[in-house]
Amino acid sequence: MPSRFIELKVVDVEMMESELRTLCARAGAEAVVLLDMSGVVLASHRVPEKIDSLLIAALLTSNFAATEELSRRLGVDNFRVMYHEGKRQNLYFDKVSDEAIIVVLFRDSNALGRVRLFCEKAIPELARLVAGVTKPSAPVLPQGRAAAEYLQRIARGINSDGSPGIQG
Amino acid sequence: MPIHNESAREIVYKIAYHGPGMCGKTTNLRFIYNTLPGRQVGRFLVLDTAVERTLYYDFLPLVIPLDDGYTARIHLYTVPGQAYYDASRRLVLRGVDGIVFVADSHPDRSQDNKDSLAMLKKDLKESGLDYSSIPLIMQWNKRDLPSPVPENELAAALNERAVPAFPAVARDGAGVFETLSGIVDAVTGST
């Protein structure tokens, strides 16, 4: 069993979303998302439904992690901010804690400094919220057991459908 | 680390497939992607080179609906097998909940398997994770080769933790879901 896990109660997500909503308004942003470092969305505000959030979350976190690793190898200490400039829209990444980052989508009519300022103001509270949902040990969840059983049924079905028998 | 999101009624686990280059990690994910119904798999992201070697990682999210209205999201990643992509591997291992080690059964790849396992231990340590305790499953792939290394020899060389090991021909799908359900078992504490 993994030694740590994140448990998000309804109230936790509501508090995170409230912080993101405030940040979005103050920073004049289009959308904000809070991600854990493994690439999972913890909370978001105004992320368009048409976006494949699973895929985007994986790409955003790996992008940030890759740049963080690059910085480490170049001897840059305390890397925590990354910025992508697009033609009309830009992305601003800021490290909330060792467990999470926020990514802000904003238009080029908005000032980067404004986004950065209000991210920095929001980060202490977001870091506190993320720390509050990070638990020291993972419980056995019945939903996890059900997922494992579902995959076992698929495995048995494929075998009975005539996939090649494997001999050691 | 696992995520239990009561608000979205979902649980999320991250699993990484590790092993030497060309051992069949991406092939495992491709079979899973092609087998499960469309609503249960997200987009299959492959960041590879022109010669289909994984450059950065592959990513396949599984979405498994459960009876009680919950959804289990299993995020599957592969890591690049080549030794010189160690930085990329460590990034993918961030927050990972379980590992599938895919070994190549070809006799000429025995040393590559050992080297890759050594890299896994090193990568985990540098990611703040412990090889001796992380949920782990072994897969002996390419069992359809004319003279594969016997399973007991693979186990003696690689499976020092004596974790469950599954023979497989990932290209044909044999053993792929047994391996997947095995690692989900291990990660969720079902066994």
Image (cartoon, coloured by chain):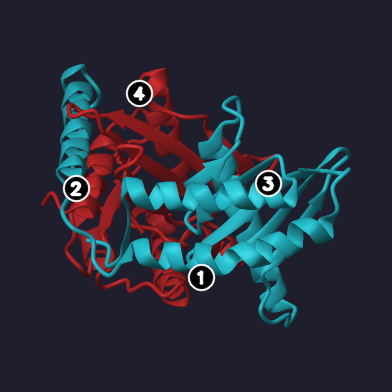
Of marks 1 and 2, the one in the foreground? 1
Instruction: Decide which of tag 3 and tag 1 comes sooner along the chain.
Output: 3
Q: Secondary structure at mark 2?
A: helix
Q: Residue at x 23, y 40 (%)?
A: B181
Q: Which chain is red?
A: B
* Residue ID for mark 1: A98
Can I make out residue A128 in this image?
yes
Q: In the rendered structure, which amino acid carries the disc numbered 2?
A: Asp
Task: Give the letter of the chain under mark 4.
Answer: B
Question: Residue B56 or A127: which is nearer the viewer?
Answer: A127
* Residue ID for mark 2: B185
Q: Secondary structure at mark 3?
A: helix
Q: Residue at x 54, y 36 (%)?
A: A53
Task: Give the letter of the chain under mark 1.
Answer: A
Q: In the rendered structure, which amino acid carries the disc numbered 1?
A: Asp
Q: Name the mark on residue B36.
A: 4
* Residue ID for mark 3: A25
Task: Give the letter of the chain under mark 3.
Answer: A
